[in-house]
Image (cartoon, rainbow, N blue to C red):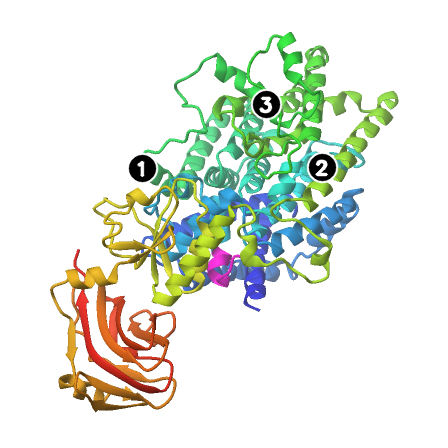
Amino acid sequence: MLLSLVGLFCSLIFFAVCDSVSRICKLPVFAALSVALAVIVAFEAVVLNILSLFNMVRAVPLLIVHSLMIGCWGAGCIIAWRRRGHWNFARYLFAWRRIARVRYISSLIPLLIILLLGAVLYPPNNYDSMSYHMARIAHWIQQQSVDYYPTSIDRQNVMGPGAEYLILIPQILAKSDVLANSVQYISYIIVLFSVLFVLRILTVSRELAPLIAILTATAPMAIMQATSTQNDLVAAAMTYAVIISARRLYTGSILRFRLRDFILLGTCLAAGFLVKPTSLLAAGPVLMVGAGHQLVRFTDFKKCIGKSILGIILVLLMGCAVAGPDILRKNSHNVSRYEVYPLFAKWNLARFKNPVAIAAHNIAVPDNPGKLLTGLGYNGPFDNSEVLSIHEDLIGNPFQIMALGLLTTATLLLTPAFIRRKKLILPYFVSLTPLLAWGVFGLIVKDQLWISRLQLPLFFLLPFAFTLPLCLLKGIKSFDFFLKMMISSSAFLALAYALVVAGNNPHRPIKLAHFWGHPPDRTSSYYNNALSEDRFSHQHVLDVARSQGCTKVGLLLGDNSNEYPLTWRLMQEGREAKHIQLGQPTQNEEWPCLYYVEFGQERRLRHRGVRWRTVDGHTYARNLEGRFHQATQEALALTFPVDQHRFVASASKVLLEPSAEGVIVRALNADPQLFLPEIVQLSAEWLVGEVVLVSPAETVVQVFYKTGKMPEYSELQSFKQGVSRGENKIYFQIPGNELKGSVRFDPGQAPGEYELKSLIIRPITR
């Protein structure tokens, strides 16, 4: 029920923003989708950064802010309704009918259904999502802020947070990650509609436009990502948001730009930067060609220059407001990414070969294209071994790269026609924008195994490559049939391959049983893309945390760990998990009551074997006996039978009798309870207790405590210890600074006579 309400609330937010953008900026409804998504990214960035100043990134403040935003939109709708006498529903009906009449688009419905099942049935389990996309969201929720935090996985801080802002809101409100994959899925649909709008601007015929859209949207990497929480589809949506917000560069004069247009462009650029700068690398050449088109159309130089300067100022102001906090954080940490070239260094021959090298990851044929390229004079790297591998980081886009290569080659061969006809100047350069974007991208981003994923926004520029060939061949019947056959065959072959890819995702496979209501196990599915060892070690630390009542787990991980399943599962049980940077003065090494240590990181855990003992090689629990005997102060010391009277008024379901060595606790049922005297607050993170108890049977001793966050006794805040028949010495730990009220001691879970000989509690000192 809560998930449905959160889904409806988020849908209402998106509809409100989309309606506002459509009406204010005079955009068709489906053209406004990508722009609205960019505006939401920008809005969330501003709201979350403001709330983070007060550590208020919580459900109630977010609900209030977004409700106010919806209220403002509703008030605007009422004002507009009073002016016109009705609300303009006609444009929504018109937009729906227009899409419904688009030929061939219905062929994508089976693909969209398969992707929807994958997005909803499976939890996030992409490896990057586990290590930083979703892990950072978990830590933001815990610290109630999107500010940087100590972590051994630096990508959790320095990578663009825009897409994760969109996931964070429903995850906080719903307290679930069921809706997490939907951000990429919705972005995929938005990009599809944006492609159709751009094709209409490029005056592509109604017969060819849907075929080109299908060919573009069925890029295998897009299919793989549409069910994940990666961010390249959101980045592609940001690319189209920038292009659509700057559409007047192509469809009119810069003098027609209004202040709202510049503000909108600045918002989209800032949102693109926050999501992923690759979106701006893809959109940049399209903007440059449009700006060049405006330069040759200047009729009033002074007005145009003045308008341009004002526009640049507004764009920069919006960029500072939206992306400024993230830029400041990055500068303060001075972290550079190895995936990109330095901007002002290493301009060598290998770098200029890189645009060719990154194309290799999408070329499936011939068997050895390197030989062909060597014959053409290229002797650089060319790895196409993983093109057909159905893997969300490695799969290539063979149909799309072939179409892009053929169209770009055709455009370059048609250069003489462009020179002779001035009307073809703009179509010529528009057709080359994918090539220009590819070159800029290749000069900035290094070749790497997962480069085809980063290239995804570039492949969504494919419609632009059709511009000049379609302009020249328009009306030539001899080529018209041939062109339709080529595009339609490529589109439907790509669609067939996309269906195969969508159904056979190794980490989120779709099976017939899923259609009959048999979903995959969600907890197990977190580990579909991880080592089985992670699943067992995560489960073990959860079990130990439950038995010891530990609500604070420290993480000692490597720089690329499968962290999210552990952190989120701990959070679902009401526990916290934090990276502990041992040795740093800002880190409290005594904060956790357990440590989860990834293999190879044991050396970082100081006092291992003395203060911390291993449970299974990954889980390290506090050495309670050693820490107890090391402590010198006493927070509470009860000796019996002298202190028997201190229990009399606070015992439940027991009878107390003195004995020679202690006090007899006669349990009247299976739930005996003793309430300890309140402990005077000490400046200690943890308290360790020692109990000497004679048990009548094999049972479980349990210690309950209350804190300010949870002022009730509960299983979450309890320490369990199994005991055998006879005398036992039990050690337990409870929080110090957070402790509220009396500690409850249950000597066993069976009726009978227990003999309590002593109970001492001491504070842990560092």
Magenta span: chief secondary structure: helix
Q: Are marks 3 and 2 in contact (CB under 8 Å)?
A: no
- In the image, 634 versus 83, the foreground residue is 634
* Mark carried by residue 213: 2
CA separation in Å, label 2 and label 1: 42 Å
- Name the secondary structure under disc 3: loop
Q: Which residue reaches farthest front?
A: 726
Q: Nearer the viewer, mark 2 or mark 1?
A: 1
- In the image, 386 versus 648, the foreground residue is 648
- In the image, 723 versus 720, the foreground residue is 723
Q: Which residue is mark 1?
A: 333
Name the N-terminal-most of marks 1 and 3. Answer: 1
The number of discs equals 3
Q: Within the magenta stretch, is there residue 480?
A: no
Q: Which residue is mark 3?
A: 383
Q: What amino acid does circle 3 point to?
A: Asp
Please provide percent x and percent y for residue 450. 54, 32
Which quarter of the rendered picture does the C terminus lie within? bottom left
Q: Nearer the viewer, mark 1 or mark 3?
A: 3
Magenta span covers which residues?
169-177
